[in-house]
Amino acid sequence: LSQMREDIKTAYRNDPALLGIFPIAAYNGGPRNVTRLYNVLKKLGVSVNTLHRPGVLPANSKVKCPCVWKQEAAGARALALPRYNNENRWYVEKYQAILESFESVLEQHAAEEAAAAARADIS
């Protein structure tokens, strides 16, 4: 992280889960891979400030993953990662899927706790 661009470091501190794609890239190929990923995002028109958590692709989507999600005025949209580094693209995809799984479990657990608390209040 210390060798990454300042804008990546700042954004990472604000949302480490979302910006975790950069340490994943670094682990896979060092600073050069981080620069490659950053440049690919830049070519796609995605900055570290417009990255968005992965969403659900519609069944008829022309975008094929691995992809990143960009926040726009109308909402988030998926952008396919080009084949700049096949291995790194799939590590990003795997990271996003694992993150989504953990967040789903946490959300379900929070909902169950809220329901139990509501039942306890009624009793």
Image (spheres, grey):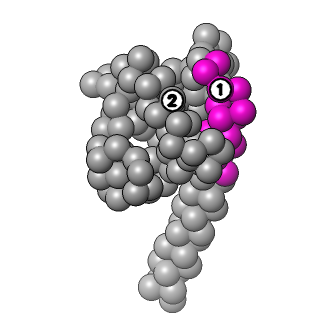
Q: Position of residue 108 (x, y in %)?
A: 60, 62
Q: Position of residue 40 (x, y in %)?
A: 48, 23
Q: Nearer the viewer, residue 104 or 96?
A: 96
Q: Position of residue 9 (x, y in %)?
A: 35, 52
Relative side of 97 to 55, left or right: right
Relative side of 105 to 122, left or right: right
The stretch of residues the image draws in magenta is 83-98
Along the polypeptide, which appears first: circle 1 or circle 2? Answer: 2
Marks 1 and 2 sit apart, C-alpha to C-alpha, by 8 Å
Vertically, is 23 above or below 49?
A: below
Circle 1 sits on which residue? 85
Q: Nearer the viewer, residue 92 or 99?
A: 92
Q: Secondary structure at mark 2?
A: helix
Classify mark 1: residues with Cα within 10 Å, few (<14), some (14-19) or many (20+).
few
Relative side of 62 to 7, left or right: right
Q: Position of residue 56 (x, y in %)?
A: 58, 32
Q: Which mark is residue 36?
A: 2
Query: At x 58% / y 27%, what residue is drawn?
Result: 67
Q: Secondary structure at mark 1?
A: loop
Q: Check if residue 7 falls in the magenta segment.
A: no
Callout 2, which amino acid? Arg
Vertically, is 76 above or below 12?
A: above
